[in-house]
Image (cartoon, rainbow, N blue to C red):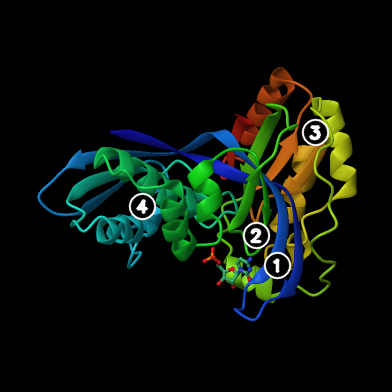
């Protein structure tokens, strides 16, 4: 069985206070892209994980991949051992603010629930997802969402168009925990407005004026190249540019597919060591 694990993009991300459990209260408009990792699930005598794709090698030294954790957690819930071989084609850069590991964990839950033909209610899958990471419940749904809480309170939201994007990662892995720890000016979560109607791409660009990514400044302090990435995307005619999640991946919103395609090609040519892709919100 093949399962797609789409990239997650935070169109904005407001961060509030640190809660008693150590996590920060968030507010975010989360979308998913038509680019992502791919999982292949096959029957096997014991669990194994094969890493493939352009960024597979980056995960080779990881002690316990989130895919393995997700498989074990769902196996325990279903009272069965996770005897499957999972091949991960890792297309998304690692530790890059676009969901990667969370998307893979969520795809494992979705895929194995179907592979094992489990009649498990979504709420139970959501509960397992929460134990795996703050973004995993959102990735389980993989549709445009309004996110609050530490990331676990999610609600599908309408109005965001299938806009063309360019995603750029400068090849610097950043630790989410470190970026949150470096947050100084916490403006807060809980004041953003949801899209009021079905937005055009231009109206979506306008909507960006009323929100921000609060993790952008702390991330730029740790990885100054993020500032360069944002300028490079803007110079190609993006309507808006912003960092996603805790970075370092940034995105540009473009007026049409052709402009996005051309921008992606130019950026990739000028920066052969960066990861650059044209994408679309799905
Ligand atoms: O939940 P996840 O493992 O993805 O979070 C990684 C780290 O990011 C947490 O250990 C925490 O330091 C930080 N974080 C946070 N508030 C959130 C989500 C993540 O402080 N809402």
Give the class, few, some or many, for how many residues have Cα within 10 Å of label 2's Cα (few <14, many ≥20): many
Looking at the image, can residue 93 be seen? no
Question: Which mark sits nearer the N-terminus, 2 or 1?
Answer: 1
Q: Secondary structure at mark 3?
A: loop
Give the class, few, some or many, for how many residues have Cα within 10 Å of label 3's Cα (few <14, many ≥20): many
Q: Secondary structure at mark 1?
A: strand
Does the numbered disc 3 mark a residue whose Cβ is under 8 Å from ligand 1?
no
Circle on res. 238: 3
Q: Residue furthest bottom?
A: 20
Question: Which mark sits nearer the N-terminus, 3 or 4?
Answer: 4
Determine which residue is flagged by label 1: 25
Residue 225's place in the image compared with 269, above or below, is: below
Determine which residue is flagged by label 2: 246
CA gap, disc 1 and disc 4: 34 Å
- Is residue 221 left or right of 100 when viewed as pictured? right
Does the numbered disc 2 mark a residue whose Cβ is under 8 Å from ligand 1?
yes
């Amino acid at each position: 069985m093949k399962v797609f694990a789409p990239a997650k993009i935070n169109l904005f991300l407001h961060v509030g206070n640190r809660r008693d459990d150590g996590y920060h209260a968030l507010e975010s408009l989360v979308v998913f892209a038509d680019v992502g990792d791919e999982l292949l699930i096959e029957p096997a005598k014991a669990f194994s994980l094969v890493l493939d794709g352009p960024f597979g090698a980056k995960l080779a030294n990881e002690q316990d991949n989130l895919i393995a954790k997700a498989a074990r957690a769902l196996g325990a819930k279903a009272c069965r051992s996770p005897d499957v071989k999972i091949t991960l084609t890792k297309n998304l850069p690692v530790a890059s603010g676009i969901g990667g590991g969370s998307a893979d964990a969520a795809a494992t839950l979705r895929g194995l629930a179907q592979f094992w033909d489990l009649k498990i209610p979504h709420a139970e899958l959501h509960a397992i997802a929460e134990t795996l990471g703050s973004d995993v419940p959102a990735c389980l749904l993989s549709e445009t969402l309004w996110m609050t809480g530490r990331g676990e309170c999610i609600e599908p939201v309408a109005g965001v168009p299938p806009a063309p994007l360019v995603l750029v990662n400068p090849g610097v892995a950043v630790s989410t925990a470190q970026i949150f720890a470096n947050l100084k000016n916490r403006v807060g979560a809980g004041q953003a407005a949801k899209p009021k109607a079905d937005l055009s791409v231009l109206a979506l660009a306008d909507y960006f004026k009323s929100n921000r990514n609060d993790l952008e400044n702390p991330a730029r302090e740790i990885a100054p190249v993020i500032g360069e990435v944002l300028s490079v995307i803007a110079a190609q005619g993006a309507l808006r540019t912003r960092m996603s999640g805790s970075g370092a991946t940034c995105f540009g919103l473009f007026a049409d597919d052709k402009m996005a395609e051309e921008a992606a090609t130019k950026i990739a040519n000028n920066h052969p060591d960066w990861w650059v892709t044209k994408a679309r919100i799905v």
